Amino acid sequence: MWPLLIVLLPVVVVALLLWLISALLLLSVVWLTWYPRRRYAIVVYSNSPVWSEYFESQVIPRLGERAVVLNWSERKRWTPSLSVMLFWVFAGSRQFNPMAIVFEPLAWPRRFRFYAAFRSFKHGHREDVEKLRVDFFRLLDDLSRPSAA
């Protein structure tokens, strides 16, 4: 076991360093290119009967140009772009659909994971989803104010 660990440790360290460098480069591009255009977030959802109607009526219409929307159900048609790369780097591998990722200046992105909240939503409990939506839009609205940009 120890020899395998000794061999794999440098590989893991290099992989983590490469991921961190790519994440920092992507954040720099966001701060330099999206901020001047007042774009601050990525929203990811899918055609799920549990949340698609909610996102299409309560979230997406309020976004305007402040966010890029990615539909997970259409990911086979995604083309390489900054928003897709940001999703793959910052969404993680769990509960990434639906979610919103907000890019604040000189800070690590803030993620709003809606998946768990929608599990109770489908049983009639809307509170967790509403709280996440309100928190997400509060942050997005704060970033959108002229003094924040």
Image (cartoon, rainbow, N blue to C red):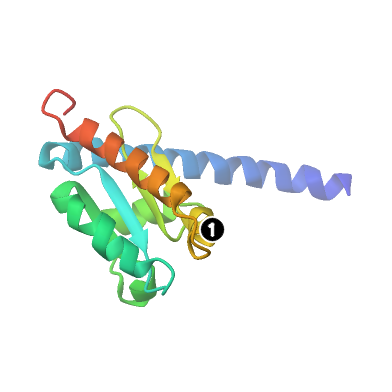
Q: How many marks?
A: 1
140 horizontally vs 52: left or right: left
Report the residue that reaches farthest toward the right.
Answer: 1
- Which residue is at a point 14% across and 30% down the rendered structure image? 145
Q: According to the image, label 1 marks what residue?
A: 120
Q: Amino acid at mark 1?
A: Ser
Q: Is residue 81 visible?
A: no
Q: Position of residue 81 (x, y in %)?
A: 26, 59
Seen in the picture, residue 84 relative to 11 is either above or below; the reply is below
Relative placement, left or right, of 63 versus 102 is: left
Residue extending farthest to the top is 147
**How many neighbours does mark 1 have within 10 angstroms: few (below 14), some (14-19), or many (20 or more)?**
some
Q: Which of the pair 121/138 is nearer the observer? A: 121
> At 38% from the left edge and 54% from the top edge, which residue is drawn?
87
Locate residue 20, reporting x and y percent: 47, 39
Query: In the rendering, at what x and y percent does residue 96 appear?
Result: 47, 57
Whether 96 is drawn above or below 52: the answer is above
Relative vertical location of residue 88 with respect to residue 52 in this rendering, above or below? above
Give the residue at x 28% y 36%: 138
> Which corner quadrant of the image does residue 80 belong to?
bottom left
- Front residue of 10/61: it is 61
Looking at the rendered structure, the secondary structure element under dot 1 is helix
Report the residue that reaches farthest toward the front. 124
| Quarter of image, res 38 | top left
Question: Residue 123, image x and y in percent?
Answer: 53, 64
